[in-house]
Structure formats: structure tokens, C-alpha cells
Amino acid sequence: MSKSKRRLCGTYVSPNTEARLKAYCAATHTTESAVIEAALVQYLTGTSDHTALFRRLDRLDRVQQRMHRDAIFYGESFAEFLRVWYAYTPELPESSKPIASQQSARRFQAFVRQLSQRLGTGRSLIDELVGDDPLALPRELERARESIPAE
């Protein structure tokens, strides 16, 4: 900015602030005007470190909310799976357990392959169901409950 376009702006500061400003300017070989102007521009445009820190904290809070939502979803899904599994799966007699163990090992390997393919796509079930809205899970679960026919 050229000298002719600059305007005098006088203000009062405490002696402590003035001493800190002078010490800073002496240490950085900067004029008081340059430091004050830079500070005012940063303050008025909202580009201070505090602003950036608060933005980052807000972003981290949203990530934490999504992780909490996902943990609730996975826990509830697993609990419901177990409830249904135990309700409809009879206990095996001892003579059938070796064959069942072999079959379960094969089925588990197929499950792992399918899961690997699913994870390779980069999309998860929770993303398909609720997207990025951290508050969507309760609404989506309620809609899912309503769509289940009564027994």
C-alpha cells in the first residue's frame, strides 16, 4: 500500500501492551504500524489461529459424532443378529458338531472374502443407510422398524 493512501488511526493501549508491541517489533525488525495493520486485517477477516483452531475443533466434533453414531449402529446390529440367531438356531447334537465345524470354517472364509470385497469399495453399510448426517441414524432406524411387518 502506498504512503499516500494510508490513514492515521490513533488508539489507546495499556502500557503493558505497548511494551510488548515495542519488544516484538524490535525482535522482528518490524514497524509498529505494520504489526498493528497485520493484526487488524487478521482480526477483521477472521483468519487468526484461533479461528482456524475452532474450525478444526468443529470438524473433529462432527467426526466424533459420526463415530459415535456408527458405534451405536454396529452394536445394535450385532445385538439384533445374536437375538435372531439364538432364537432360530437349534443346538446341535454332539455327533454333528465335527461336520458343522468344517462347514462353518468354509462359510466363514466365504464371509471374509465377501467382506474384503465390500471394504475394497470404500463404502460401508452405514454410509449407504445414513450418509454423513450424524443425527440420521435414529431417524433411519425408526423408519426401518416401521417397515418391518408385525409378527
Image: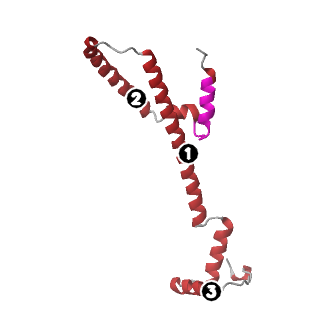
Would you say 95 lies left or right of 81 here?
A: left
Main secondary structure along the magenta-highlighted residues: helix
For discs 2 and 1, the disc positioned in front in the rendered view: 1
Q: Is residue 45 above or below residue 115?
A: below
When the figure is inspected, residue 64 is found, relative to residue 113, above or below; the finding is: below
Mark 1 closeness class: few <14, some 14–19, many ≥20 residues within 10 Å:
some
Q: Check disc 1 and report the residue beneath it.
A: 65
- Disc nearer the start of the sequence (3/1): 3
Give, as a single range, the part of the protein colored magenta.
131-145
Is 10 rendered above or below residue 130?
below
Q: Quadrant of the C terminus?
A: top right
**Residue 39: image tag:** none
Q: Position of residue 90 (x, y in %)?
A: 39, 14
Q: Secondary structure at mark 2?
A: helix
134 falls in the magenta region: yes
- What residue is pinned by disc 2? 115
**Observer-nearest residue: 5 or 124?**
124
Q: Quadrant of residue 141?
A: top right
Q: Which mark is residue 18?
A: 3
